[in-house]
Structure formats: structure tokens, C-alpha cells
Image (cartoon, rainbow, N blue to C red):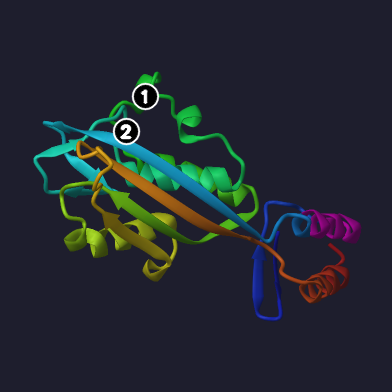
Amino acid sequence: MKSKSSGTEWVTNYKITQLQNYKFLFREQTLKPEFRIGYGWDSHEFKPGIPLKIGGLTLPHDQGLGGHSDGDVLLHAITDALLGAIAGPDIGSLFPPSDAQWKNADSSLFLQEALQRVKSAGYELLNLDSTLILSAPKIGPHAGAIRKHVAELCGIPADCVGIKAKTPEGMGTENAAIANVVVLLKRAGLKNTEDLDDVLTAIGTQRV
């Protein structure tokens, strides 16, 4: 169903045939928390002979991150943060390393699945913030490109993506890369009862 009212357009998978059905849908939507926060963490060990993928980009380095897929530690952490925000299964449950089909898989596939689950749960991604912890390579020269690419993958503006990097001083993790990510989701759909009144009026007039 597609309805337009007060300059706003709503698209839903539901077919509304009675006003009471729409009221029920509106109540179900507004009972959900307006905002949700998700946290994701991942780490991978550096290994020679493989490309280094971070944020969906290949960075110049003499080692890459080992993993069953492409080892993209940042996209894995973002994926888990999104899934955690909607209380969904984690990335390892959805894409187990025991499954051969995910061998060397592009991690953007995992991210897209998480984003689709967020949408199906009735939410949309507002912004994300990340911190990478690794000895090398330096992320600073690549941060802008990573931010732009992650924003494109997530469908949000680049200024809603935070990319920071730290060195693992005193942590003893020099041979690994670690990613920490926090995401903020907002409930999608109608925002207030005035919107509801407008749509109900339109539905009543059209006798859907």
C-alpha cells in the first residue's frame, strides 16, 4: 500500500482494508522503542599472502586478516551491532564458518542481510561510530575513503559514519586487528497521531 498525506509518503508491505486494521498496525508500531542501540566487536589475526579488507576496501599492506570469509573486521562488527540492536542472531549463527558457501565471501553480503533484518523489524539506521585497534597499517590516510564506502553500503550520509583508529599499546594484540562499533537505530513509519488522522481520513475518503 502507498499513501500520501501532508507531503509525506509511506510505503508498507501491509494491505490495509479496514480502519481498525490500520489502527492496530499503528499501535503495534508505536509500542516498539523509538530508538535502539547496538554494539559489535570483532577481531582477526594478520596472515601473509591475503589482501587486507577493512570497511569493504582493500588497503595496501603486506598481510591481510585471516577468516573464513574475507576477514573484514569492520564490516563484521557493524553487522553484529545491527543484529544486536534488534535482538537478532549474531553473525556467526547466520553465517557459520562451518558452512563452505561463506568461504572467502564478501562481508558486504553479511552487512546487507543485517540491514534487511533491521528494516523488517521496523527500524532504520541513523548513524554508527567505530574504533579500529591495530598496529599497522595507519588508518588515517584511508579513513575518508572507508567512511564514504561504509556510508554507501549502509545507505546513510558519510557524516553519520565515524571511523577512528588506535594502536594497541600494552594490549599484546600487535598481530591482530580489532573493531568496536556502536549503531543507533530509529523506529521507522508514522511518527505521531496527526499523521494517523491524516491517513485514516484519506483511507475513509477512498473507501479502501
| Residue at the image position 44 percent from the left and 29 percent from the top | 95
Query: Taking 161 as reference, is 74 above or below it?
Result: above
* Residue sticking out furthest to the left: 62
* Residue sticking out furthest to the bottom: 6
For the question of whether residue 115 can be seen, the reply is no
For the question of whether residue 156 can be seen, the reply is yes
Q: Main secondary structure of the magenta part?
A: helix
Q: Amino acid at mark 2?
A: Ala
Q: Check disc 2 and report the residue beneath it.
A: 105
Q: Is residue 22 left or right of residue 51?
A: right
Q: Secondary structure at mark 2?
A: loop
- Start-end of magenta stretch: 17-28
* Quadrant of the drawing holding the N terminus: bottom right
Mark 2 packing: few (<14 Cα in 10 Å), some, or many (20+)?
some
Q: Check disc 1 and report the residue beneath it.
A: 101
Give me the C-alpha separation between circle 2 and circle 1.
8 Å
Q: Secondary structure at mark 1?
A: helix
Q: Is residue 48 left or right of residue 200?
A: left
Q: Amino acid at mark 1?
A: Gln
